[in-house]
Image (cartoon, rainbow, N blue to C red):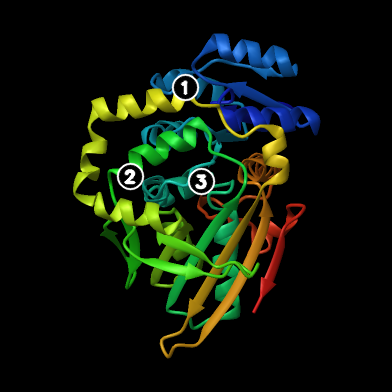
Amino acid sequence: MPGKILVYGSYGYTGDLIARFAKADEVDVVLSGRNSERLREQAERYGLESVPADLSNPESIRKVLRDKEVVIHCAGPFAHTYKAMARACLETGTHYTDITGEAEVFQGLWAMDEEAKRAGIMLLPGTGFDVVPTDCLAAHLKSRCPEATHLEMAFRGRGGGVSHGTAKTMAEGMAQGGIVRRDGKVVDVPAAWKTRTIDFGDGRPSHCMTIPWGDVITAYRSTGIPNIMVYMAVPKRPAQMLRLARPLLPLLGLRPVQNLIKKRIEAAPAGPDDRARATAHLDLWGEAKTADGQTTVSRLRTPESYTLTARMALSIAQKICSGQHTPGFQTPSTAYGKDLILEFPGTERVDE
């Protein structure tokens, strides 16, 4: 199906990786975004088709989506962009995917579940590192521990780096504190609410703190487990400083402060280079627990997060084009099973 995959926001760091891999793998994609100059330069570099479109103009984005099977939405922070793209997809019958990890986006798209079913399209956010590995890990743990009432997961990056888009999303999120799921409900908690020392399987336990990761939403959709927390490996001292700074964190949400932070982000490298990505990897850990205290632990190791995101997002889009899709709001594991992550070369899963 030539040209049926639209990559929107293609000239950002991850979007450009997707375009590179699509060209190398001879996957026919169409590049899109609102900056026509950057888009044209990228399209010429890779020899791919491009069509400019602006999410702030509904007819503009509907026009470019009308003959597309699926969009890989890469223009974040997604809290600002997902509604316009999802609405356009509902109107054009285009399947929606993105590379977000923002809990707000997962909640918002889940609320569109019935509309998506009526339109016959799938809404599948989080088709990269956020949240394919963790979602598959959650579903795997549920299969091993069907009576689980509590789920905790954690991840640790080894090497690599952070893109401009990820850094901007993190900057916006810091002002909002954290979230967990308690008795089936999403509950706001302070930043770095809980800490835990976690063994990722290499004999070097890491200090971890809770973060408002998307799995607080998606893992509940995938498993029905009512109590969920997600941790990220952060050295003890920075985590302590973050807790001490809690009263000041709302100031980070002020526009002048956000503008200053984002200006500094733009001055940094766009993201990890090829060498850094090739040598980095991710460690993931998960624990399911029953009401009587029985615990089940599994771990994952995957290649670097941006490589995983670009490759997995493209692979899922190809699955959709081949007819593998279920209308409504889905998570990676509800759409393609708990072993989806194992399709990615270099991924290992270990059960205790």
Cα distance between the residues tagged 1 and 3: 29 Å
Cα distance between the residues tagged 3 and 2: 21 Å
Residue annotated with mark 2? 174
Residue annotated with mark 3? 125
Is residue 90 in sight in this rendering?
A: no
Residue annotated with mark 1? 267
Q: Badge 2, how many Cα within 10 Å: few under 14, some, many 20+? A: some
Is residue 174 in sight in this rendering?
A: yes
Question: Depth check: 346 or 70 in front?
Answer: 346
Q: As drawn, which residue projects farthest toward the left?
A: 247
Q: Badge 3, how many Cα within 10 Å: few under 14, some, many 20+? A: many
Say which label, 2 or 1, has the lower sequence index: 2
Q: Is residue 266 above or below residue 320?
A: above
Amino acid tagged 1: Ala
Amino acid tagged 2: Met
Q: Is residue 96 above or below residue 298?
A: above
Report the residue at 55% width, 68% height from top: 205
Say which label, 1 or 3, has the lower sequence index: 3
Are the residues tagged 1 and 3 within 8 Å (C-beta)? no
- Image quarter where the C terminus lies is bottom right
Amino acid tagged 3: Pro
